[in-house]
Image (cartoon, grey):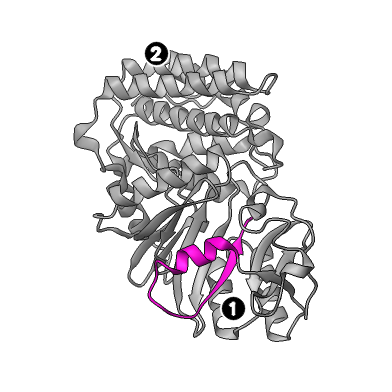
Amino acid sequence: MGCVVTTIDTEALAQLWSTDDLRADHVSAAEGRTFLVLPSIDRPRLVVPTRPHRAAGAIVRALRDKSSTKARAKTLAIRTALATGAKGTWLPDPDLFGEVIRQLPQEEYVYGVHLGPPRANRKPVLVLATAQGGLVAFVKCGVNALTDQLVHAEAAALTSVAHLTSLRTPHLIGMGEHRDHPYTVQSPVPTNRHRRSAAHIVAAQVEVASVGRGSIDVTAELDAVAERWRQRVIAAADGQPGVKEFAGLAERWTERAHGSSLNWGSWHGDWRRTNMAVTSSGCSVWDWERFATGVPVGYDALHLFLMSHASSVHDLSSLPVDLFDNAQRLLRPFGVRGRTEAELTTAGYLLELSGRYIDDNQSQTGVRLGPVHEWLLPFLSTTLMHQVQHGAGRPGSGVSEP
């Protein structure tokens, strides 16, 4: 039998297991099972069951990260450890697991937990599978005000996008509350990557952008964006870097946008390679907690480009430059034709991204992109905002409005 955990030092993990739950005299073979807690009990990011093998394999496949060679190597190491009978940690089944399976058909279920690295929106995600290895559901549970808001937002988003035909989205199986925090139960979507077709991805992004488009009042949405950005500044921690710069840039962008012809719609909010898969049955997209209506169309294409290049660049300050240079090409499928509109849309996206990191105080979590005051806001201030104010190409680019 494996060792018994005696301490819980993360908010996300404590939402599932209290310190009392994990006392040795509370744990018995009838109440729990063994898990690999990775990379360690002190820094838990992934909790994978050691048995049954088929269920463990299904859970590892559901949680696998294929975004890099290093990530794929870690997944292989986990699968090797399970296959060779690595010693596990004994954990009792959390109350949340019992609550969820009561909403599902009667069956023997096994679960794993994904926590990921420390970050502002960190929360436990349970993956449920049958003992025979059939993937059943993903369960997301809030742990604080920010993650509670995201859980509620995703539930609403899944309802808003359920009718879309160019992509596959999770089905909302159920909702509930656990220890005063909300949780959702979602169905899995196909993730067996079949091909990487840019056309399939663009078609799906364009359809998402169309959600709610006919009912958008542009003036009202601009005012709402401006107010949301103002509230982020007000709520920012005292002395948080970049807040004053963000406030000034946001005000200037809003003034310019009021006199523009930007097209408005919706976006997924975090469309990146790890949240999607182009499969034989179409484009699957998950993690809809950042979905929003009332943004210039094309934000998803810009976000995917930026996030796809972020891990491969040494100097982060080159990211917004590259995005700016590719903006018109990326936004053309969304009906954005002019360079001024493309650059104004890109400025709005970069400000939205900056505001999100400021709002979540990501500069304090160790996330590489978190310190936007170092790599993003200077670009917006000295380069991109010059175009916004003067209606010309980026200084030094030699490009002007066609």
36 lies left or right of 199: right
Q: Name the residue that disc number 2 marks.
A: 255
Looking at the picture, tell me which residue is in the foreground, 274 or 94: 94
Q: Tell me the amino acid under the disc marked 2.
A: Glu
Point 68% across, 23% down: residue: 241
Point 49% across, 34% down: residue: 324
Could you tell me which secondary element the residue under label 1 belongs to? Answer: helix
Placement of 75 over or under 144, stated as above or below: below
Rendering quarter of residue 103: bottom left
Looking at the picture, tell me which residue is in the foreground, 314 or 108: 108
Q: Name the residue that disc number 1 marks.
A: 56
Crowding at dot 2, Cα within 10 Å, few <14 / some 14-19 / many 20+, comes out as some
Q: State the CA–CA distance, disc 2 to disc 1.
A: 54 Å
Crowding at dot 1, Cα within 10 Å, few <14 / some 14-19 / many 20+, comes out as many
Q: Earlier in the sequence, mark 2 or mark 1?
A: 1
Image: magenta residue range? 94-116
106 magenta-colored:
yes
Point 59% across, 84% down: residue: 52
Rendering quarter of residue 211: top left
